Amino acid sequence: MSGLPRILHSLSGYTLVELLVALSVGSLAMTGMLQAYAVGRSGYEQVQHTARLHEQAQYVFSALEADLQMAGYYGLVSASDAPDTAAVSDRAAGCGLGLAQQLSQAVSLSDGAYPLRCPAAGGGWLPGSDVLTVRRASASPGRADPGRLQLLTQVSGDGPSQLIANGLIPADCQLTNGRCELRDLLVHVYYVARAADATLAHEALWESPSHRGNMLSPRFGRVGVGVVRNADGVWVTELFTD
């Protein structure tokens, strides 16, 4: 019995105060690690978002650059000699006759307003954004296609140019003998579409007859889709080119 006090005296451990201090220091260290991770994660997401914006902006500007370089190109016809009137199809006239007829105005910009009569696809036009319209002819001659606006010109330059929408070519102007040239009239309207999410944007674009026609048309070999998400929702744009 005389050795028991000495054994108990030799046993030692951490006091409650020491445990609390250790827990506090560990909690502070863990909190700092979590905060550092959150900051690193947020920075990574911001870098990824910026990189996506840059990539999409590069594609949009590259597409706009090519289209703007071709603006006012009507094959054998200059912009000043291009016809201003035509039997425009109902689908083209739905957005306003001037959209397809004012060929002398190769590029037009609407500052903060939506100038077309037809509703904007992609969930609607974003209020306050600009609308850019580019008019030109296709890069390569094509064949007659009813329902499309096409520019018919004589290679000799003797006869007047004309817009046709029914695919009917005059008897004295045939494409096979090289006397005439036929090119599709391209009117590209760029605007910012506002949609709640990507699914709604896709459905809205598909329900638009003009967008659906472009999606299903065999004349277009390339399509670009730009999507940007911010606090206002999802902005979607589609660009079709031959």
Image: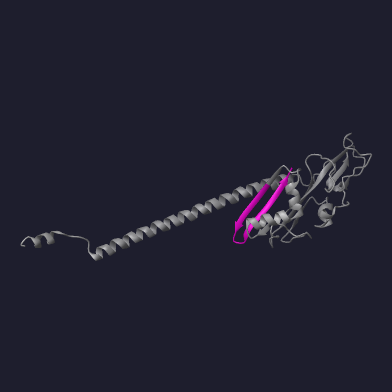
Relative image position of residue 80 (x, y in whole percent): 85, 48
Q: Is residue 157 left or right of residue 50?
A: right
Magenta segment: does it hold 14? Answer: no
Q: Is residue 45 left or right of residue 213?
A: left
Q: Name which residue lies at 41% across and 57% down.
A: 34
Range of magenta residues: 224-242
Q: Residue furthest top?
A: 177
Report whether 201 appears left or right of 142: left
Residue 112, image x, y percentages: 71, 61
Residue furthest toward the front? 1
Query: Looking at the image, which residue is at 60% across and 56% down?
Result: 229
Reply above or below: 75 against 49.
above
Residue 237 falls within the magenta-colored stretch: yes
Residue plotted at (83% across, 48% down) = 149
Q: Toward the viewer: 65 or 122?
A: 122
Q: Percent from the top left, x then y, of residue 21?
A: 28, 63
- Quarter location, residue 19: bottom left
Residue drawn at point x = 87 percent, y = 43 percent: 152
Q: Is residue 4 above or below residue 70?
A: below
Residue furthest out toward the right: 172
**Magenta span main SS:** strand
User: Which quarter of the picture shows residue 2?
Assistant: bottom left
